[in-house]
Amino acid sequence: MNDNIRLKILTEKYINNDVLKWYFDKEVTRFSDNQHRKFNLNMQKQYVKNCQLSNSRFLHGIFFDNTYIGNILISNISNYHKTAEISYFIGDKRYWGKGIMTTVIKMVVHIAKDSLKLNKLYAGVASENYASIKALEKNNFIKEGKRIQHLYYNSKYYDQIDYGLLLNYF
């Protein structure tokens, strides 16, 4: 299955009304700040374009058998500290539960280490986002801390679990 997964720097040509539906799906955005944002086609295309122009964030589309199914973002890149944050989601629910994100995170770890020459990646995850926690831990991310009631999703507070991975030991 890993041979079927590809990452590509996302371009506006992949943003359409079907993709936009991901951001309105309460299951897809259950543990995402996207549930608090407004979305339309032009705004999403502009966001993708802004990511392309940025030196501090890289938005990759996740493709399975050439079908665009989600995103992974490397952001908050600090050239001084050699750190960056990752955030991700699979919008097409037909691809949930197949281990795809575990593979995608592994791919991004290699990009961060080999191409971006970073020392560390980090991610913050809602305490009940078990799939995300599992994907990070399978990639050797270590729990570094917990922020109590730090996230507010769907009228409920969640703890944020902070994970990190030192790339020079990977």
Image (cartoon, grey):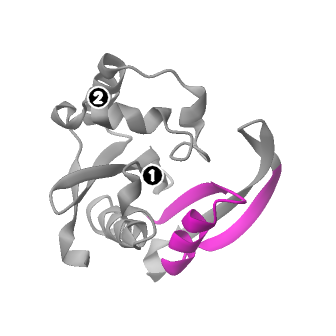
* Residue at figure coordinates x 50%, y 46% from the top left: 28
Quadrant hosting residue 150: top right
Mark 2 and mark 1: span between their CA atoms? 17 Å
State how many labels appear. Answer: 2
* Residue at figure coordinates x 36%, y 49% from the top left: 71
Mark 2 lies on a secondary structure that is: helix
Please provide the residue range marked out in magenta: 119-148
Comparing 42 with 91, the one in front is 91
Label whose residue precedes the other's in the sequence (2 or 1): 2
> Residue farthest to the front?
94
Using the rendered image of the protein, determine whether residue 145 is visible from the camera's viewpoint.
yes
Residue 14 vs 98, above or below: the answer is above
Residue 67 place in picture, x, y as percent: 20, 53
Q: Label 1 amino acid?
A: Phe
* Residue at figure coordinates x 25%, y 33% from the top left: 15
- Label 1 sits on residue: 89
Using the rendered image of the protein, determine whether residue 51 is visible from the camera's viewpoint.
no
Q: Label 2 amino acid?
A: Asn
Residue 5 place in picture, x, y as percent: 23, 67
Residue 15 vs 169, above or below: the answer is above
**Crowding near the residue tagged with mark 1, few <14, some 14–19, many ≥20 C-alpha atoms within 10 Å:** many
Is 143 on the left-hand or right-hand side of 155? left
